[in-house]
Amino acid sequence: MTQQRRLRILGLDPAAAGATGYGVVESDGRTSRALTFGAMKPRRTAQSALRLREIHARVAELIEQHAPDVVALESVFSALNVRTALLLSEVRGVILLAAAERNIPVHSYSPREVKSSVAGYGHASKEQVQQMVRAELHLAEAPQPADASDALAVALCHVHLSEANARIAAALGPNVVLPAQATRRRSPLRAARIRA
């Protein structure tokens, strides 16, 4: 029996002002486990540029320590006000830069996609998501802080969608091209295109 390759994902839940959650998950397609998780909380007194540099440095350090195959990132929530969205985009930018510097692919998932994938319901509460993350990763307690739990959920979302796309591709055969990531508002199956 051949041993299946383990996929390692660095999940990140960026924050405009508070802590940016991180979690490294390793999965063989059947079981997943958390390697590390926590939250990066830059100094409150730090200027915006210094804060962004701290986040970039910490993400780069996590990438060096854990060598993830992919970075999974929560996307900007559309109902945010403009100022918050801009601050969040800056944080996402330094995360994207850290991954690009090491040639690591990045996939973004909306909060609703993450909740739906992990808890089975796109409007699940933070507590429901935490409990599902705890159960799926076989943790004794729900991950704390909540930012870390959210980051682990983003990583698990990537695991679930990658597995689903792999199963669909295997079922449909070699003449089907699947997008690298399922597009929003469409299932991976509908997004598949048959080669001419």
Image (cartoon, helix red, strand yellow):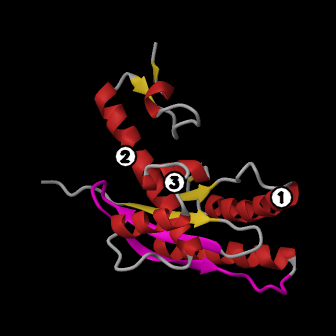
Sequence-wise, the earlier of marks 1 and 2 is 1
User: Which SS type dominates the magenta stretch?
Assistant: strand
Residue where numbered disc 2 is placed: 163
**Residue on which the image places disc 3:** 115
Of 154 and 170, which appears nearest the observer? 154
Q: Secondary structure at mark 1?
A: helix
Q: Amino acid under label 3?
A: Lys
Residue mark closest to the camera, 3 vs 1: 3
44 over 173 or under it: above or below = below
Indicate which disc, 2 or 3, sits on the residue closer to the N terminus: 3
At 44% from the left and 58% from the top, the residue drawn is: 156
Count neighbours of disc 2 (C-alpha within 10 A) and say few if under 14, some if 14 to 19, many if 20 or more.
some
Q: Amino acid at mark 1?
A: Leu
Query: For numbered disc 3, what is the local secondary structure?
Result: helix
Report whether 128 appears left or right of 166: right
Q: Residue at x 35, y 67 (%)?
A: 135
State the CA–CA distance, disc 1 to disc 2: 33 Å
